[in-house]
């Protein structure tokens, strides 16, 4: 039986701030190729400010540059980045431009706006849920699949209204994003949805354990489906170029510069590396609420001239920075999965991973370190920079292993879980 | 006539402690872990198995015999961490039914990289065995049964040996059986004893494998296979790691009962007996010359060197180690020389093996590191510190260490784009 899924997403390329959009696109494309019919409901992007200027917004086939056979997109108005922090919202980098004043789903949702996320996101989450409920009356579907907490209220409400089973996919939890200082409101949304859902997909055992231990969810309800990575037939590797002026080794941090991603551990490790070797530079590519603090920290550590901050990179700039890099480091404090290291390996850059990540449990040909152990992090960075055989093996073996993370496998497993959930063959 | 020839390999390396590039202390080895493992294996394997052998020798008089090759690194650890094990081996030695073989003191790959060091380690090990067990070894086995014609020649040049052991690999034997005694093409006076890998591995690896069609392996069944050799060979060379008993095959698999019952069952057949390798060499003429131009070992299905030298990290690490040889000697520092030798133990390179890493397999069980990469990093950090102990002479770069024949094996791949290793 072909199961028709109503999928609830929040971000989708090119309007992404992190792994969620990448994961949604990869999974959806693979499900499309497997012939799984999907109605994908997304907030309709308005012209929004990204670093480098304003980009006119629209979602879907044209914007992603991919043709879909079995996926239909349904935009609903709402514009916010999922992981925006209060600092970002205050600076206006990610504010919604549209307030259509539509009635909110319920007062509780509307009035929850305190703390880390700023008031607007709760309104947006509520508006999204209301629009989804309206949409649900006219769409035909068998099952609801919601991605991360912003879409969970919509998913839970729609499941109640329609009587269709709800599958939620957890790409990150409030504990990953905020450490122990969780936003109670967001936590409550996550917990409520986890208990209401028929099935929960975690992107790793690491995340599955958090769901079970922190949210009190029965273990048998939670399945692990690893993410994949889009493969590009080696075109990137073959276009690898040498940089005439490059005399320094380059260690790369690429990701949001937020508490979750551990930028300060990267910088402390960098300082230790520079105690031992001179010809190395550290690039921090990304934006986030810890950007300025990180710039200050680099200066305080006396390594300001060795750390380059590029801000948020996209498209060809990402490719170029990977081509320059000798090592990619993901020092995350808590990383549910971590697609970025797989992308680095696609670009033939060896990777050093935080053990506090989903990818570390699933990937073998990488160096791994506890995020807080900056001495060991530096030790391993130095080893990769100093010993060509290590660099070469991590690169070639890692590249080969990264090819095994295929979205088709994730999609196929998802299809099985859908069937199990509906109790059909 | 079928002579059963047991040779047990006894070895533990000096495992390294976690050593970062920031470490400055000169103690590289993990005394706590080494003591712990030594005592654990003593409890599970060495002591109980020695006890069984002792009983068997007493029960069967001089009819039951075995041989051991015990490395210098494990003997040193026995002396330090488990002296009762050393005493029990000495007790066995005193029965006159146990032969001790000679190998490289540090269970090293020195034959491949430094002929001088190889000779020194062989001589040192022979002396150690003489000192501890009161007998002079006359049979040689190289680390991991690594062998080719040149090993035999080198051992013949050292002198005092009458036989050498090697893997009875199909590709060196061809149609011939491992159950005869052979000789190398150009090492006069040396006989070649080849491991019967089928029967050896039945005990060492398959004994507890429930998916094996012959499981469970009874003593009766195994003796039938041995008896089948009668008329088709003289000797069944059962060469296994001693840790097979109680450590690789746990006690609850019945491995001790198997060992306990085996001699009685073997000796039921009037044509059978037990012989040590030296006795085999004395008793039987060589049936043929076996020419082994390429290196073989007893490891994995490939029977080559890829478990220790199969990837760029392993080749780089060992080349860098032997590159320091002259500087270490010139330093005149006995502690430095001892540390340098302990780093030669093949286990350190085995930990860097990536052959089956993707699948996570048997290699993992013996590996104290999470990944081969961690093992390489640790080893290179230690080397880096050791280089600083050599003084200025350690910085000089003599010609790259000689790799006698390790790269001429057919199965060996040299990763492209590799300019550093070897």
Image: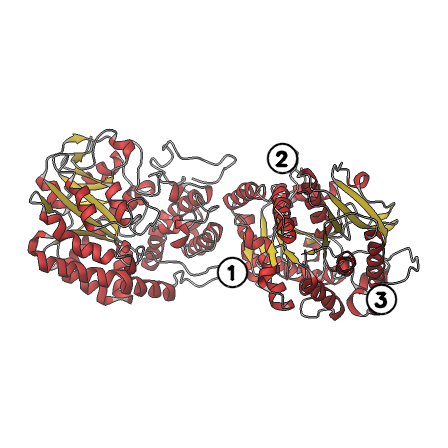
The residue wearing badge 3 is: A106
**Callout in the foreground (3, 2):** 3
Q: Mark 1 points at which residue?
A: B22
Q: Which chain carries label 1?
A: B
Location of mark 2 (residue): A234
Left or right for A404, reference B358: right
Which of the 4 image quarters holds residue B96? bottom left
**Are labels 2 and 1 assigned to the same chain?**
no
Q: Mark 2: give few (<14), some (14-19) or many (20+) Cα within 10 Å.
A: few
Q: Where is residue A32 in the image (x, y as percent from the top left)?
A: 70, 40
Residue contact at pointers 3 and 2, CB within 8 angstroms: no
Q: Position of residue B2 (x, y in %)?
A: 12, 41
Q: How far apart are marks 2 and 1 (CA)?
A: 38 Å
Instruction: Specify the quadrant of the image occupied by residue B15.
Output: bottom left
Q: Is residue B9 above or below residue A191?
A: above
Percent position (x, y) of residue A231?
A: 64, 39
Q: Do labels 3 and 2 share a chain?
A: yes
Quadrant in which the N terminus of chain B appears: top left
Label 3 is found on which chain of the structure?
A: A
Chain under numbered label 2: A
SS assignment at label 3? loop
Specify whether residue A248 is in view: no
């Amino acid at each position: 039986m072909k199961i028709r899924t109503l999928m609830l997403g929040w971000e989708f390329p090119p309007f992404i701030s992190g792994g969620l959009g990448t994961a949604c696109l990869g999974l959806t494309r693979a499900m499309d190729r497997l012939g799984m019919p999907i109605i994908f409901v997304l907030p309709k992007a308005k012209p929004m400010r990204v670093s480098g200027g304003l980009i006119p917004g629209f979602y879907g086939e044209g914007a992603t540059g991919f043709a879909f056979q079995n996926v239909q997109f349904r935009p609903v108005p709402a514009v916010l980045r999922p992981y925006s922090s209060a600092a970002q919202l205050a600076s206006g980098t990610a504010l919604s431009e549209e307030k259509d004043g539509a009635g909110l789903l319920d007062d509780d949702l509307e009035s929850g706006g305190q703390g880390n996320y700023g008031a607007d996101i709760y309104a947006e989450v509520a508006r999204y849920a209301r629009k989804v409920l309206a949409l649900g009356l006219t769409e035909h579907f068998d099952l609801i699949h919601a991605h991360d907490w912003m879409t969970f209220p919509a998913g839970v409400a729609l499941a109640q209204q329609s009587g269709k089973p709800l599958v939620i996919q957890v790409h990150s939890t409030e504990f990953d994003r905020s450490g122990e200082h969780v936003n109670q409101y967001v936590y409550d949304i996550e917990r409520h949805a986890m208990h209401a859902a028929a099935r929960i997909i975690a992107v790793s055992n690491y995340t599955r354990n958090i769901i079970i231990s922190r949210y009190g969810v029965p273990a048998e309800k939670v399945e692990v489906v690893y993410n994949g990575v889009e493969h590009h037939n080696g075109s990137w590797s073959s276009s690898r170029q040498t940089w005439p002026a490059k005399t320094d080794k380059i260690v790369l941090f690429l990701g949001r510069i937020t508490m979750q991603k551990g930028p300060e551990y990267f910088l402390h490790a960098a300082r230790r590396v520079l105690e031992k070797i001179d010809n190395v530079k550290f690039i921090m590519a990304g934006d986030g609420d810890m950007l300025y603090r990180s710039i200050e920290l680099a200066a305080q550590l006396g390594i300001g001239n060795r750390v380059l901050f590029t801000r948020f990179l996209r498209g060809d700039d990402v490719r170029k920075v990977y081509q320059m890099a000798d090592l990619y480091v993901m020092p995350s404090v808590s990383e549910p999965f971590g697609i970025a290291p797989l992308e680095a390996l696609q670009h033939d850059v060896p990777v050093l991973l935080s053990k506090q990540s989903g990818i570390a449990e699933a990937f073998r040909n990488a160096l791994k370190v506890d995020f807080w152990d900056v001495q060991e992090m530096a030790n391993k960075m130095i080893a990769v920079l100093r010993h060509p055989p290590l660099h070469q093996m991590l690169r070639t073996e890692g590249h080969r292993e990264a090819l095994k993370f295929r979205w088709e496998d994730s999609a196929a497993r998802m299809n099985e879980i859908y069937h199990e959930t509906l109790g059909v063959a | 006539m079928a002579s059963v020839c047991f040779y047990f390999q006894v070895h533990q390396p000096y495992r390294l402690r976690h050593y970062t590039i920031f470490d400055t202390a000169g103690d590289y080895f993990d005394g706590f872990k080494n003591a712990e493992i030594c005592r654990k294996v003593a409890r599970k394997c060495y002591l109980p198995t020695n006890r069984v052998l002792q009983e068997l020798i007493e029960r069967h008089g001089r009819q039951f015999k075995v041989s051991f090759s015990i490395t210098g690194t494990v003997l040193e650890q026995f002396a330090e961490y488990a002296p009762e094990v050393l005493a029990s081996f000495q007790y066995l030695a005193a029965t006159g039914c146990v032969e001790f073989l000679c190998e490289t003191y540090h269970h090293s790959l020195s034959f491949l990289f430094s002929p001088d060091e190889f000779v020194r380690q062989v001589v040192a090990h022979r002396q150690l065995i003489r000192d501890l067990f009161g007998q002079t070894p006359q049979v040689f086995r190289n680390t991991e049964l690594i062998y080719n014609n040149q090993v035999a020649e080198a051992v013949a040049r050292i002198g005092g040996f009458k036989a050498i052991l090697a893997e009875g690999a199909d590709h060196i034997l061809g149609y011939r059986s491992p159950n005869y005694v052979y000789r190398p093409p150009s090492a006069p006076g040396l006989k070649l004893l080849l491991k019967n890998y089928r029967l050896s591995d039945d005990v060492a690896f398959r004994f507890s494998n429930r998916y094996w069609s012959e499981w469970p392996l009874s003593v009766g069944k195994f003796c039938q296979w041995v008896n089948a050799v009668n008329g088709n060979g003289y000797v069944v060379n059962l060469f296994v790691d001693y840790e097979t008993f109680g450590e690789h095959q746990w006690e609850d698999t019945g491995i001790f009962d198997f060992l306990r019952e085996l001699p009685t069952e073997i000796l039921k057949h009037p044509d059978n007996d037990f012989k040590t390798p030296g006795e085999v060499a004395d008793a039987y003429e060589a049936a043929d010359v076996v020419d082994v131009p390429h290196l073989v070992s007893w490891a994995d299905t490939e029977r080559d060197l890829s478990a220790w030298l199969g990837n760029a990290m392993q080749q780089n690490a060992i080349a860098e180690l032997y590159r320091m040889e002259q500087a270490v000697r010139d330093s005149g520092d006995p502690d430095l020389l001892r540390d340098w030798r302990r780093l030669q133990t093949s286990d350190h390179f085995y930990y860097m093996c990536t052959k089956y890493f993707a699948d996570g397999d048997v290699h993992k069980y013996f590996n104290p590191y999470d990944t081969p990469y961690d093992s390489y990093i640790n080893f290179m950090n230690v080397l880096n510190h050791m280089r600083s102990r050599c003084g200025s002479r350690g910085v000089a770069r003599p010609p790259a260490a000689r790799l006698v024949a390790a790269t001429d094996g057919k199965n060996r791949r040299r990763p492209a784009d590799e300019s550093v290793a070897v």
